[in-house]
Structure formats: structure tokens, C-alpha cells
Image (tube, rainbow, N blue to C red):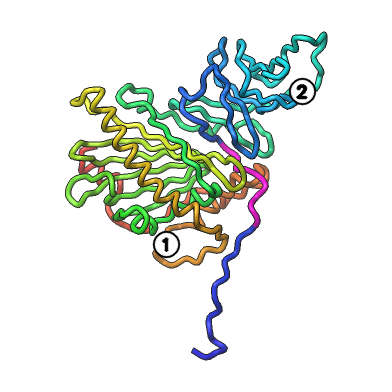
């Protein structure tokens, strides 16, 4: 190779961090985490207050500071379906409108704070974030998880894990087949992705550092993003000789532009042969092992740089495909392009499919 032909060092490129947060539903916790005691939420670069109404039993989320003199509403109390500021006892209804000032003859017309759209489903509490302040998109509501309602599964075992990163960096994992071996000590026998509308799905068969199943230690995993921040994974396998069918939850909610909280959850199908205490012990053990595995990703996310022009090779998964899909949630609704939402599939490793392995296992 001559001096003229010498390849120049690759230059990493990264655009400034966007000033907006992705449009969609975010998990703030499980249902039990929101009570009639106001709870502070540090999300979306601000502070919100979440509480459950005494009268309607519904979850309400409002902007967290009283516009009167800046009192912290999460330090107040719930009365009826309103939250009362601890500073001067201004009361704010679930619609965000001030409904009582104990010492005023007239409530100011401007006394309204933002009431955030909420959803309680699958044992989880969601908040809708939209930089255009539009109402939730009906067809993007998370699907019902029949297993949670069946009584045959445990409730969610939840943890909150801080991450020093951005949403897109986390979503890259859906297409990043090559990281499973080095980071998670797993083997991959088949790997494919599918995108359609607001969903992105990862299908994987392989070995796993926690679960094993049958000859060759095969497990199945189907991970589905519904929107930019709500991902559930259904996995089958066994642990310590016990058959396991589990759902994992990964929902990342931004604290600010450079930090997230991962609301991580595990629910497990109960083994009817085990006592409630034994099932709980299995759930606890599996949860802790998964958190340990998840922290392997966290160690990478907290220390990697942002790359907008990743240098790819022919064995990598469809990183550009998942990033194009994710970009729809950072785009104004009127400007979303067909290539951001159209149905596409990509096979990175063509091997035994999830459907084939489950059929062979009689599931």
C-alpha cells in the first residue's frame, strides 16, 4: 500500500444531544408504587408529582411545583382527588386546575398546571410524554399482558437502576447480536429482528448464563419494544432443574438529557408443584441473577461514547434499522416518514427459530 493509498484513521461523529425526549409511554413503577401519599418523580428534566386519588382510586401525575410560590407538591398531601401544596395549602385537582385556596375569595384564572396523561395496565403505571403536547396515540397503547391478569403468574418484582446514557443507546441492544457473547457470556443460535409501526421485536434462540433448556442449553427469547421506552421480554428455559417461563420488563425513563432510570421488572409463571414461598424464592433468585446480568450492560452504557456513524461489519445486527425505527419518536408526528415505520425483517443468524424450539418443547 502506497502512502497515497494509506487508510486514514476512522473519525467518530456524534451530534449534540437532542433537546427533546422521545414521544411515547414510559413506566414510572408498578401499581403498588403509587399510593395516596404523593410521590416525587424526577423525569424529563423536571420534577413531577404522582399520587392516587382517594375518591376515584386513579393515578394522577401533575407538574411537581406549585406556581404560587414554588412549593414542592410531593411534600403535600392528597385530599379527595387533589394534591395540596404544603407551603400555602393551594389545592390542585387531577386536571391540573387549582380548586381551592383557603384564604382567597377568588382563584386566579391562570391557576392551572400541567396534568400528564397516565395509564395503569399490566400491573404497571405509565406516563405519556410528547414534545408536541399531543394526546396519546390510541394505537400505541401498550398491549394487555394476559399472563399478569391470569393469576397463574407472580406480580412484578421491580428494581430502579440509574444509567448515564441516552435512550437510543439502550435501544441499540435490540439489534446488537454481537454483544451477547462478550458481555453476557451467551451463545446465539438464531437471531432476527422485525420492525412495524411503533413496534420493534427481537427473536433469539441460544444459550444463556442464567437459563438453560434441554440438550445444548437452548433458551428462547422474544423481546418487544412498544414505543421508545417500554420493552418486555418473554423467555423460556430452566434454572436449577426447574422449568422457567418469565417476563422481563425494561422501561427506561429519562431523568435529563444524559441520564435515565431503568424500571426493571421480572414476573414468573408459578410452578403449581411448589409452595408460594418456594415460588417466591425462585423469583427472588432469578431476579437477582438477572439484575447482575443487566449490570453487565450498564457497565458498558455508563462508559461508552455516543457514535452516530458506527463502523459496522457483515456480522453485525441491523443497528441502522433499529435507529431508523427509533427516530420516529424523535420526529414530529406530521413529519414521520414511511421508512421509519414500514414493516421490515432482518435475519442476522439463520438457525432454529423461537417457534421451532417452543414446538419441540411442547409449548
Q: Residue at x 33, y 57 (%)?
A: 181
Tell me the tag on residue 316.
1
* Residue 83, above or below 308: above
Task: Determine if the magenta segment contains residue 17.
Answer: yes
N-terminal of the pair, mark 1 or mark 2, is 2
The residue positioned farthest toward the front in the image shown: 87
Q: Is residue 70 left or right of residue 18?
A: right
Q: Nearer the viewer, residue 314 or 212?
A: 212
Q: Nearer the viewer, residue 97 or 315?
A: 97
Q: Secondary structure at mark 1?
A: loop
Tell me the tag on residue 68.
2
Q: Position of residue 294 (x, y in %)?
A: 39, 46
* Quadrant for the C terminus in the image: top left
Q: Residue at x 34, y 38 (%)?
A: 288
Q: Nearer the viewer, residue 159 or 121?
A: 159
Q: Position of residue 136 (x, y in %)?
A: 60, 31
For marks 1 and 2, give the CA distance. Answer: 54 Å
The residue positioned farthest toward the bottom in the image shown: 2
Q: Nearer the viewer, mark 1 or mark 2?
A: 2
Q: Residue at x 40, y 43 (%)?
A: 223
Q: Sort mark 1 into few (<14), some (14-19) or many (20+) by Cα contacts within 10 Å.
A: some
Q: Write down the region rendered in magenta.
A: 16-24
Q: Secondary structure at mark 2?
A: loop
Q: Residue at x 49, y 48 (%)?
A: 171
* Residue 70, above or below 20: above
Q: Position of residue 278 (x, y in %)?
A: 23, 27
Majority SS type along the magenta span: loop
- For the residues labelled 1 and 2, say whether their Cβ atoms are less than 8 Å apart: no
Amino acid at each position: 500500500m502506497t502512502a497515497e493509498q494509506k487508510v486514514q484513521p476512522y473519525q467518530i461523529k456524534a451530534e449534540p444531544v437532542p433537546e427533546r425526549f422521545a414521544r411515547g409511554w414510559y413506566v414510572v413503577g408498578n401499581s403498588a408504587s403509587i399510593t395516596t401519599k404523593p410521590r416525587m418523580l424526577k423525569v424529563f428534566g423536571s420534577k413531577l408529582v404522582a399520587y392516587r386519588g382517594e375518591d376515584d382510586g386513579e393515578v394522577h401525575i401533575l407538574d411537581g411545583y406549585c406556581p404560587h410560590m414554588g412549593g414542592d407538591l410531593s411534600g403535600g398531601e392528597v385530599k379527595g382527588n387533589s394534591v395540596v401544596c404544603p407551603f400555602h395549602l393551594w389545592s390542585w385537582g387531577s386536571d391540573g386546575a387549582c380548586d381551592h385556596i383557603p384564604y382567597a375569595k377568588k382563584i386566579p384564572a391562570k391557576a392551572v398546571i400541567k396534568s400528564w396523561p397516565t395509564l395503569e395496565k399490566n400491573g404497571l403505571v405509565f406516563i405519556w410524554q410528547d414534545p408536541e403536547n399531543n394526546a396519546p396515540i390510541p394505537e400505541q397503547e401498550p398491549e394487555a399482558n394476559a399472563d399478569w391478569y391470569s393469576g397463574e403468574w407472580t406480580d412484578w418484582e421491580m428494581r430502579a437502576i440509574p444509567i448515564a446514557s441516552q435512550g437510543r443507546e439502550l435501544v441499540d441492544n435490540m439489534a446488537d447480536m454481537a454483544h451477547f457473547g462478550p458481555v453476557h457470556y451467551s451463545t446465539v443460535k438464531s437471531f432476527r429482528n422485525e420492525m412495524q409501526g411503533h413496534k420493534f421485536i427481537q427473536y433469539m434462540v441460544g444459550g444463556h448464563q442464567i437459563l438453560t433448556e434441554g440438550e445444548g442449553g437452548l433458551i428462547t427469547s422474544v423481546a418487544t419494544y412498544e414505543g421508545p421506552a417500554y420493552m418486555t421480554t418473554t423467555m423460556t428455559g430452566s434454572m436449577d432443574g426447574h422449568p422457567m417461563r418469565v417476563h422481563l420488563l425494561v422501561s427506561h425513563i429519562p431523568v435529563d438529557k444524559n441520564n435515565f432510570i431503568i424500571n426493571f421488572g421480572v414476573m414468573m409463571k408459578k410452578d403449581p408443584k411448589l409452595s408460594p414461598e418456594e415460588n417466591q424464592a425462585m423469583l427472588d433468585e432469578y431476579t437477582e441473577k438477572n439484575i447482575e446480568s443487566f449490570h453487565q450492560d450498564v457497565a458498558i452504557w455508563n462508559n461508552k461514547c455516543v457514535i452516530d456513524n458506527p463502523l459496522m461489519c457483515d456480522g453485525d445486527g441491523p443497528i441502522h434499522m433499529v435507529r431508523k425505527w427509533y427516530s420516529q419518536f424523535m420526529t414530529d408526528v406530521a413529519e414521520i416518514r414511511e421508512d421509519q415505520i414500514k414493516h421490515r425483517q432482518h435475519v442476522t443468524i439463520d438457525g432454529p427459530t423461537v417457534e421451532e424450539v417452543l414446538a419441540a418443547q411442547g409449548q
